[in-house]
Image (tube, rainbow, N blue to C red):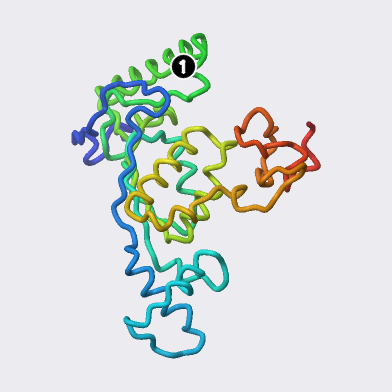
Amino acid sequence: MTTMSRKGSNVFNEAPDQQGRNDEYYANLEVHILQYPTREQFLKLMSKASVAVRGNIVGDEEIDEVMADDMLRGGLNQSLEWMQVIFEVGGVSRGVTHQLVRTRKASFAQQSMRYANMGTFNARVPVRISKSPEALRIWRKAIEASRQAYQELTNMGVPMEDARTVCPIATQTYIICSYPLSEFLALYSYRACQMFYPEMVALMGLMKAELIRVCPWLEEHIKISCEKTGPGINGLPHKCMYQGFEMVQGNCTFEWAVEDNRVYKSRKVDR
């Protein structure tokens, strides 16, 4: 028995645009929206849903914009799950997509490194590493070693599903993300917080920009969790909602990112 033999392993399915780039900051990170609710669709469905508890059929001409918009503010708003938003994302790192796919009420279609030959794969440099010449030198050395190892393994006829194991999570990939509208609003509220991984925060910003480009009426509802809170301490406009272990002061640019203004802090983390 040979470990190199696997049906279809020698088929060359070259992944497009893999040029061996090391993209710094968010160069070549792209988001396009593929599906979104129109204002007319939203008003019609939400108007009907708002009176479903009464059990009466609402004619299309009986649209209640106030009741429909209230669905975005609370109450029995499970009908927001009926509206889908779908994004196409390119140039995002595997590290970020590992986090994206944790969202349970979403659906994804991602580039397969088991199927696609990644060639001299593109990689995304983390922001903090790109700012340090010495850290960037070490990072580039490791990435080039991974690229060389991947090339040598695939040239030997090693199946791509095995060769891919030398690729780092900085490897750029392609993914389609489908969310119920309610789930995207919740995802943005959580993941757009500046305390999360910078590439994830940047991706959330690009998704928001694409969505409000075609649905400007949604802009006021796409907010980070802290932006939805009431006043904080000492006249601050909001409270900090971050629940991680890191200090928010000095790491978040919002004026209300103050340790004593946080809603939640773990009592077991040594500060």
Q: Is residue 113 visible?
A: no
Rendered image quadrant of residue 206: top left
Q: Position of residue 152 (x, y in %)?
A: 30, 19
Residue drawn at (67%, 34%) of the image: 248
Element assignment for label 1: helix
Crowd rating for badge 1 (residues with CA inside 10 Å; few <14, some 14–19, many 20+)? some
Q: Position of residue 69 (x, y in %)?
A: 47, 68
**Is residue 19 or residue 161 the one in the foreground?**
19
Q: Position of residue 68 (x, y in %)?
A: 45, 72
**Is residue 135 or residue 225 the one in the foreground?**
225
Q: Is residue 3 visible?
A: yes
Q: Position of residue 107 (x, y in %)?
A: 39, 55
Above or below residue 110? Residue 64 is below
Residue drawn at (80%, 42%) of the image: 267
Above or below residue 75? Residue 201 is above
**Is residue 214 or residue 35 the one in the foreground?**
214
Rendered image quadrant of residue 271: top right
Residue placed under numbered mark 1 in the picture: 139
Rendered image quadrant of residue 125: top left
Query: Is 268 displayed left or right of 202 in the figure?
Result: right
Above or below residue 203? Residue 123 is above
Q: How many marks?
A: 1
Quadrant of the image containing the N terminus: top left
Above or below residue 82? Residue 194 is above
Looking at the picture, which amino acid does disc 1 mark?
A: Trp
Residue drawn at (34%, 29%) of the image: 163
Residue drawn at (61%, 33%) of the image: 252
**Is residue 155 or residue 53 the one in the foreground?**
53
Query: Is 238 displayed left or right of 131 in the figure?
Result: right
Given the current orientation, which residue lies at the most extreme front position?
A: 235
